[in-house]
Image (cartoon, coloured by chain):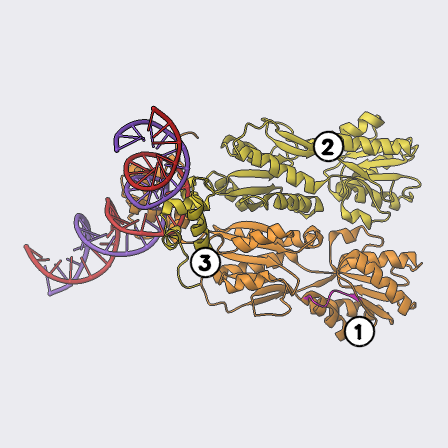
Chain colours: A orange, B yellow, C red, D purple
Amino acid sequence: MIEPRPTIETVAARAGVGRGTASRVVNGSSQVSPAARAAVLKAIDELGYVPNRAARNLVTRRTDCVALVISEPGERLFAEPYFAGIVRGISAALAETPLQLWLSMVQSTAERDRANRFLTREHVDGVMMLSQHGDDPLPGKVLASGLPLVLCGRPLAGPEMPFVDADNESGGRLAGQHFLDLGRRRIATIAGPQDMAAGVARLQGFRDVVGGDLVEYGDFSEESGARAMAALLEREPALDAVFAASDPMAFGAMRVLKAAGRRIPEDVAVIGFDGSPGGRHSDPPLTSVFQPAEEMGREMTRLLLTQLAGEVPTETRVIVGTRLELRGSA
Amino acid sequence: MIEPRPTIETVAARAGVGRGTASRVVNGSSQVSPAARAAVLKAIDELGYVPNRAARNLVTRRTDCVALVISEPGERLFAEPYFAGIVRGISAALAETPLQLWLSMVQSTAERDRANRFLTREHVDGVMMLSQHGDDPLPGKVLASGLPLVLCGRPLAGPEMPFVDADNESGGRLAGQHFLDLGRRRIATIAGPQDMAAGVARLQGFRDVVGGDLVEYGDFSEESGARAMAALLEREPALDAVFAASDPMAFGAMRVLKAAGRRIPEDVAVIGFDGSPGGRHSDPPLTSVFQPAEEMGREMTRLLLTQLAGEVPTETRVIVGTRLELRGSA
DNA sequence: CCGGTATCTGGGAGCGCTCCCAAGAGCATC
DNA sequence: GATGCTCTTGGGAGCGCTCCCAGATACCGG
């Protein structure tokens, strides 16, 4: 512990070979005789040698680090299990590589500054980004710097960039179809913000099936869901189903519906979007369109790894399926 | 972008000073004349110079990285907003430092191997660890390696290590006292696992106030809460209050109570522990002991930074307060 | 036995930085 | 004007590694 860590030179000396040969063994080159390889491996083991990352990075000009940037002000996104799933997927996928995951939350201005400064080749080999807002300048900057980038969530506008997204449109269709199957007739929706691709696509899919114009807009938050629900009830007191483009909005809507004396699902069926575990304990349990966050994390990693391997990316977008998680509210 | 990044030598040349002086300016040494400093800063700005991290780390023998290790199998811990809050707190606190946050989830064996290999001075300057189980070998290993370490959650046994924890005992007391204030008489508790400090302390505090032996044990999961509740009802059908040592256990308990025809809170008052947002939408909304996760994250960071600064840690434990979040279930 | 080829090896060079030493410059003092 | 400070400066050394080249060795066929 106090004595200095062994260097590759120490290893080479102990194995009775040159520095070059030792390095070759460490890096798995095939140009080494079996005898030399065995000697070096033995020395490595005896000395507990671990390559110095800084020295290696200095010469290879790689960092073996990828960044996961959560560019979302406020606590909304991060608190959701959806996010946790993504991180879990990424972490699992990276476990098989030498890459480390550098986590950067960008909420305050200080953090934004930092991210701007650190998202360079000096610091990371690639970037994965959770940024739902179309006007976020960060993805564009990273792309312009030539750093490999994968987004979570389809960017609404701007230049083409690789992304992984849930099939929001078909998720919306699932919700709509379920209401129709249930025989509901006056079907409303609380759409997400239309400056986010997820908001647009969920509404689009839903309307493909249901049609109609009983739509109010929220910002994915519970409060906005409550407001939208109140407005919808005012417009159409006889509505018998409502699809909210996020679970929190669905919770807000249920609160308002119950306050207005509606029974769920008897009077009004409710479907949310996310499939969050919290929905299992709501009153009633919330039926919701589930998006496979963990799979999305894995796919993001896969896409990034392809780019890092320098392969021409044949695949720049991955859409993962959604499914309806039936609980009690619809 | 194609042209090579400027080095400190480029900067020095452009500023008309020596490499040493340029380095001194970059590192904020005071031993530089105002004229030289200005020239160097100008050159840095014009060239867009960013110090090469690997080269710097190589010579300073620091990495400017700290690890956050989530050593918890399964998805339980990570999915909770409690965790999200901790990460947010850490991230915010680190934003003011040059340190980067390396996130490591240790769930699978592969990930455990990796963590074992990477949690060394070669890779990180310090480690923060979320590991609730007393028998986890990882904290001990890190401590033994001499790497600065801060735990989240008091370690149950083993050598002394710095930690930040919620005041679980007083949280338990808060719950107990609230039941007494409510005039409840037959008060039960679903305690957490007694091989975790949090489980022990929450029970301890609760019993300090309430006494009695109407106790069943769970593992913090919903399913275990349901089982424990069923057992409690069998032992004491007339119970009128129950404190669960985690929100998921409280959810499980409420499910069983409702199935048994008890009204909450009229017949049986329920209090959970965590103050998770999901509790706002349960039926009824769950009264719960809230622990300030974000503050805990900040405190962990602060403790680690003191150690990194090489100061003798006058403070090796921080206990943050809890409070009762009154919703509808008690 | 020789030239040619393939395989393996050692070690110099150099990545970009900080540390540190010695030297120069500037100034006050005697 | 010499002496002794302090403040500032340039650049050599070296961190531990990989890359690469030139040399050594082994092996082949003619």
Contact, CB < 8 Å: mark 2 with mark 1? no
Find residue A250 and report its horizontal and vertical position in percent: 80, 59
Instruction: Check disc 3: other Cα within 10 Å, few if <14, some if 14-19, many if 20+.
Output: few
Q: Which residue is mark 3?
A: B46
Chain holding disc 3: B
Nearer the observer, C14 or A99: C14
| Marks 1 and 3 share the same chain | no
> Disc 3 on helix, strand or loop?
helix
Magenta stretch bounds:
A190-196
Vertical side of A46 occupied by A307: above or below: below
| Marks 2 and 1 share the same chain | no
Camera-side mark, 2 or 1: 2
**Is residue A104 shown to the viewer in this render?**
yes
> In the image, is residue B16 part of the stretch drawn in magenta?
no
Find residue B202 and report its horizontal and vertical position in percent: 75, 32
Vertical side of B181 occupied by A211: above or below: below
How far separated are the C-alphas under marks 1 and 3?
Answer: 58 Å
Secondary structure of the magenta portion, mostly? loop
How far separated are the C-alphas under marks 3 and 2?
Answer: 52 Å
**Residue B167 circle label:** 2
Camera-side mark, 1 or 3: 3
Q: Which residue is mark 1?
A: A210
The residue drawn where x is 84% and y is 25% is B211
The quadrant of the rendering that contains the N terminus of chain A is top left
